[in-house]
Amino acid sequence: MEKFNILEGIAAPMPLINIDTDMLIPKQFLKTIKRTGLGENLFFEMRYDQNGNEIKDFILNKDHYSKASIIVGGANFGCGSSREHAPWALKDFGIKCIISTSFADIFFNNCFKNGILPIIVSEDLHQILLQDAEMETTSIMKIDLKNQKIVRNNGDQLDFEVDEFKKYCLLNGLDDIGLTLKSADKISSFEKEYSDKFSWS
C-alpha cells in the first residue's frame, strides 16, 4: 500500500448527507475482485446519464474538480452496505482523503485499510472547508498526516484527530497483509518449530 504523509490537491465539495456505498459504486460493478478499473464507475448514477454520457453539472465531471484528490463530504459518508469496492473505486479515481463530520463505521475502517484518510471535523470547520472547496481559487488544500494538520489555501492550519495505530499504518503504507508480513520471521520460526514438534513423517 502506498505511504500517506503529505497530500496536496484539489478538494471537491460534496455536501450531500448519507452518501452510501451504492451511490459510490453501484452493485452491478461488484463482480470484480480487482482493485483497479473501478474509478470510472465511481458515482456512476450521478456522473452519467442513461446513454452513458457525462452529466456536466456533476462536480467530479467539471474540469477543475475532475482532478480532485480530496472530497469534503456530507454527514454519514459511506453508509449502506459494507462493500470494500467503495474505497477501491475512490482510490482508483484518485481520491486519497475524505473530510466529513461523520462516517459509517465499516466504510471508515475500510478507508484506512486501502490507503485513504477519512478525517472527522466539527460542523464549524466543515463549513469553512466546504466553502473553500466550492471556490476553485481556494479549493487546493494540504493534508499533513504526520502533524495532523489541514492547511487551507490561505495558510491557516486546522488540527484533526486520528487514531495512532491507523496513523502509523497509513504513514508506513501498511494494510492488513503488510502488518502480517512485518512478523514474517516470527511466523516462519513458529511454523518450523511446529513442524519439527508435530511432524507427520
Image (tube, rainbow, N blue to C red):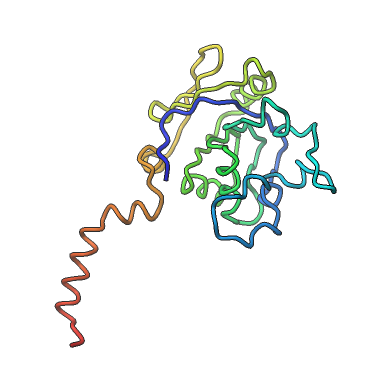
Q: Quadrant of the C terminus?
A: bottom left
Residue 133 at what x, y percent from top left? 65, 23
Give the farthest residue toward the bottom. 201
Give the farthest residue toward the top. 154
Q: Which residue is drawn at 50% across and 41% down?
A: 116
- The answer to whether 184 is drawn above or below residue 160 in the figure is below
Give the quadrant of residue 102. top right
Q: Residue at x 38, y 46 (%)?
A: 174
State left or right for residue 176 relative to residue 109. Answer: left
Residue 121 at what x, y percent from top left? 56, 30
Residue 35 at what x, y percent from top left? 54, 52
Give the quadrant of residue 138. top right
State left or right for residue 6 relative to residue 135. Answer: left
Q: Say how many tags the image has.
A: 0
- The answer to whether 88 is drawn above or below residue 184 in the figure is above
Q: Residue at x 71, y 39 (%)?
A: 17
Q: Nearer the viewer, residue 16 or 32?
A: 32
Give the quadrant of residue 11. top right
Q: Which of 40 and 91 is in front in this view?
A: 40
State left or right for residue 9 relative to residue 57. Answer: left
Q: Residue at x 67, y 35 (%)?
A: 74
